[in-house]
Image (spheres, rainbow, N blue to C red):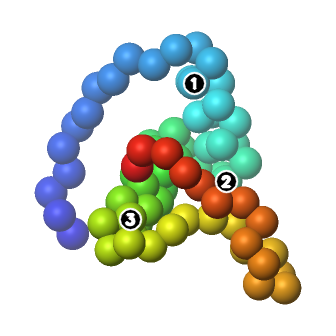
């Protein structure tokens, strides 16, 4: 396992409440939520560099929502 680095950041109360809710919903910690979010961002960024698109696909395979904007 890679060596861990401690990180400190300032966030708004709204963002903190969101992180707490996500942590509660996923039975994890706020750090877990941030790690997962960064992992998803990494995949999205790498895909974009390869000319791929990010979106939500329905069970039938139809693109329901495409995520656009800076990644």
Work out whether 60 lies above or below 50. below
* Left or right: residue 10 compared with residue 63: left
Q: Is residue 2 left or right of residue 38?
A: left
Residue drawn 57% across and 24% down? 15
The mark closer to the camera, 2 or 1, is 1
3 or 1: tag closer to the N-terminus: 1
Q: Which residue lies furthest to the right in this view?
A: 60
Q: Residue 23 carries which label?
A: none
Q: Report how far apart the C-alphas of labels 3 and 1 lie in the structure.
A: 26 Å
Q: Where is residue 57 in the image (x, y as percent from the top left)?
A: 73, 73
Reading the image, the residue beneath label 2 is 26
Structural distance between the alpha carbons of marks 2 and 1: 16 Å
User: Residue 11 occupies which quadrant of the picture?
Assistant: top left
Q: What element carries label 3?
A: helix
Q: Where is residue 69 in the image (x, y as percent from the top left)?
A: 49, 45
Residue 8 appears in view? yes
Counting residues from the start of the chain, the first of labels 2 and 1 encountered is 1
Q: Name the residue under label 1.
A: 15
Which tag is nearer the camera, tag 3 or tag 1? 3
Judged from this view, the residue extending furthest toward the bottom is 60
Give the structural element (helix, strand or loop) at label 2: loop
Earlier in the chain: of badge 2 and badge 3, it is 2
Residue sitting at x 30%, y 66%: 49
Identify the residue position indicated by label 3 in the image.
48
How far is disc 2 from disc 3 in space, using C-alphas? 27 Å
Place of residue 58 in the rendered image (x, y in percent of width and height, measured from the top left):
80, 75
Disc 1 residue crowd, few under 14, some 14–19, many 20+, Cα 10 Å:
few
């Amino acid at each position: 396992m890679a060596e861990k680095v401690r990180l400190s950041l300032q966030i708004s109360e709204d963002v903190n409440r969101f992180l707490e809710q996500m942590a509660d919903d996923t039975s994890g910690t706020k750090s877990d939520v941030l790690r997962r979010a960064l992992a998803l961002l990494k995949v999205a960024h790498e895909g974009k560099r390869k000319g791929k698109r990010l979106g939500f696909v329905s069970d039938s395979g139809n693109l329901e929502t495409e995520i656009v904007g800076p990644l």
